[in-house]
Amino acid sequence: MRVAVVGAGPAGVRAVEVLVAAGHRPVWIDEAPEGGGRIYQRPPAPLQRDAKTLYGFEAKRATALHAAFDALKTRADWRPETLAWHIRAGAKRLHTLHRGAQGVVDYDAALLCTGAMDRVIPVPGWTQPGVTTLGGAQIALKAQGCGIGRRVAFLGSGPLLWLIAYQYAKAGAEVVAVLDTTPFATKAAAAPRLLRGGATFAKGLFYVGWLRAHRVRVAEGVTPLAIEGGAEGVTGLRWRDAAGREHEVACDAVGMGWGLKPEAQLADLAGIPFRFDALQHNWVPQRDAAGRTPIAGHYLAGDGAGIGGAEVAELAGARAALALLQDAGQAVDATTVARLDAALAQQQRFRAALDRAFPFPAHLAAALPDDAILCRCEGLRAGELRAAARADNAAGPAPEMNRAKAFSRTGMGRCQGRVCGAAAAEILAAELGQPVKAIGRLRGQPPVKPMPIPAPRPAREAVS
Amino acid sequence: MRLHRLRDADRPRIALTLEGQAIEAQQGDTLLTALLAGGAGHLRRSEFGDGARAGFCLMGACQDCWVAVEGLGRVRACATLAEPGMAVRRG
């Protein structure tokens, strides 16, 4: 049986571990040069790799995952720096790109562990140099030893916001503000259920407490107004507090993000149906608790199958690999399956509480001013998308996201709506007076990321 | 935008150029780090006239850090390691 695993983050590593232990040698693809995924991304070799400094509380987990990866890469058909740019589920074929060269991988079973990226709400001024996602700010620090600026403000919601602010402050950056758009009361209401998360919840409280104790300016329930800038990039961040007062803080960089969303383009191209997960407020590919999808021979695990975090991804990767083996008629250890199922179910309850504590502030996305840039690839402003939804639009109002894309080019750029898609959906839904679920989602298109189109070879010159 | 080297900032130096101007970087830098810690300020300009860009996601997804490297063509600065002697143009 030929097995292909896409992704070498926490889910992919644990999946390959199970497959190798069962006697397989899967083709294993990742865009990065090494395993670990974005969460445990290792710095390039010339940088020091002291796990405690890089990963804090997660050092043990990161070290264990890296060790597992290092032991596995020679026992699998490991293909680093390789983009899986298309999947054809009927033909059971992946199309790849490695250093400019195309390839194909034929498989009998595929396990997609494609991860996640930041979910973003545009703020006026957000395209200026000096503004990054929260995940980007973290990668700059962990993988490159750099802060995104000298005086950094962090804006958004979710556990990452506080974690990254803490990591920056510990590394010696000046954190000028941590602005959480979630009101305190929302988080407090979810607190009893969050206690189930045990250590994870305690770590979250620790970061918030540490930042307050070190007199970092923090505010909750804020409404971002604008990122100010000049010729050199960001100069400040303006917001309105919960009581309606306006504030501005001087800074030269802003990291922002509102939780994560699945990188599920390959699942989409494989024809796996999606559903709107109201609690996560994300479109997620359909799968059962073990990672089986409605498309036979195709499995999903990790954040690409719905946001659960790194710990869940490790469990889900192992579980999906076992499901794959079970479906292929191989015997698996029932105790292991039962243990993973129980652990995943417990994590699911904690995750639900976390999603309730940090709900996606759809109203902020829907309120983006007409003249603010929404789609950074195409330089489109929010008003241009709204125009596509109005009754007086030349071709009639766009009733759903893909039609709005065709009319306005929102999401048609080189990132394929990865960055603007979540906010664009809220803007369109609000303009049409529909729930966001009703206006659909941007369909994936191959190639899932831009790739060079090789020019044809010149005809051989006539020999004179 | 100027990236601020916070730790591990004394690695062997490498030299590259941006639009012909010398940029001093460090071994292990991505092109994005090399340029934005080296004073480039930005990496590209929006094709639609709305200003300078310097990347956004830093994880290979947003495609807003494109630069051109002689011999390599267009690359994502965040996903490409800086090498000595690279001749870079803004994307």
Image (cartoon, grey):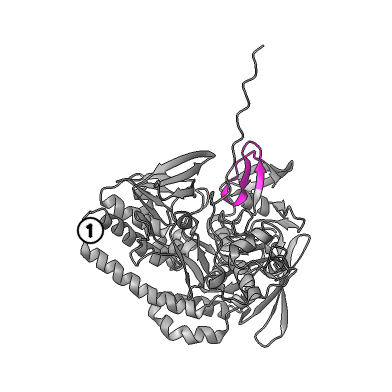
Is residue B41 shown to the viewer in this render? Answer: yes
The outermost residue toward the top is A464
Q: Nearer the viewer, residue A62 or A310?
A: A310
Residue type at mark 1?
A: Val
Q: Eyeballing the image, is A421 above or below A220?
A: above
Magenta region: B67-87
Magenta residue check for A410: no
Q: Name which residue lies at 44% across and 41% down.
A: A104
- Residue A389 vs residue A292: left or right? right
Mark 1 is surrounded, within 10 Å at the Cα level, by few (under 14), some (14 to 19) or many (20 or more) other residues, namely some
Is residue A252 shown to the viewer in this render? Answer: no
| Quarter of the figure with the C terminus of chain A | top right
- Residue A13, percent from left and from top: 38, 55
Q: Eyeballing the image, is B10 above or below A293?
A: above
- The residue singled out by tag 1 in the image is A332
Q: Secondary structure at mark 1?
A: loop
Magenta residue check for B78: yes
- Residue A433 vs residue A329: left or right? right
